[in-house]
Image (spheres, grey):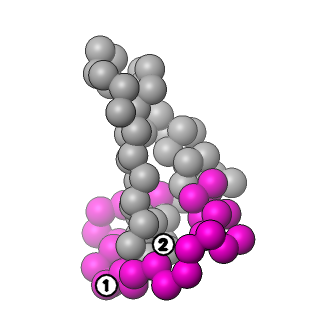
Amino acid sequence: MIREVLRMGDPRLWQKSLPVARFNTIELNELLKDMRDTVAHLDGAGLAAPQIGVLLRVVIFGVHANPRYPGVEEV
């Protein structure tokens, strides 16, 4: 699912995120899928969970033939 990305100035971005307590859960896997869908939809290179309003210390990144970053090596 594509999530709304919060904009700079949103007070939720100032809140302290929590570490992930449990791995390989349905909820964490769904969050990661939503983050991948969102970053792909925006032709982005990375996304942190707080940027979509989820206060967990989760970040994804990677670039594969991205039109926003032509000529950048794959990561």
Regarding mark 1 in the picture, which secondary structure is present there?
loop
What residue is rendered at 29% in x and 15% in y? 71
Residue 30 as seen in the image, left or right of residue 14: right
**How far is disc 1 from disc 2 in space, using C-alphas?**
11 Å
What residue is rendered at 38% in x and 73% in y? 57
Q: Is residue 70 visible?
A: yes
Q: Nearer the viewer, residue 5 or 1?
A: 1
Name the image quarter holding residue 72. Answer: top left
Magenta segment, which residues? Answer: 5-34
Say whether residue 14 is magenta: yes
Q: Amino acid at mark 1?
A: Lys
What residue is rendered at 39% in x and 81% in y? 19
Residue 72 as seen in the image, left or right of residue 36: left
Say whether residue 6 is magenta: yes
Q: Residues within 10 Å of mark 1 (few under 14, many from 20)?
A: few
Q: Is residue 6 visible?
A: no
Residue labelled with disc 1: 16
Percent x, y of residue 61: 39, 46
Q: Amino acid at mark 2?
A: Gly
Q: Which mark is residue 53?
A: 2
User: In the image, which is nearer the foreground, mark 1 or mark 2?
Assistant: 1
Outermost top residue = 71
Regarding mark 2 in the picture, which secondary structure is present there?
loop
- Quadrant where the N terminus sits is bottom right
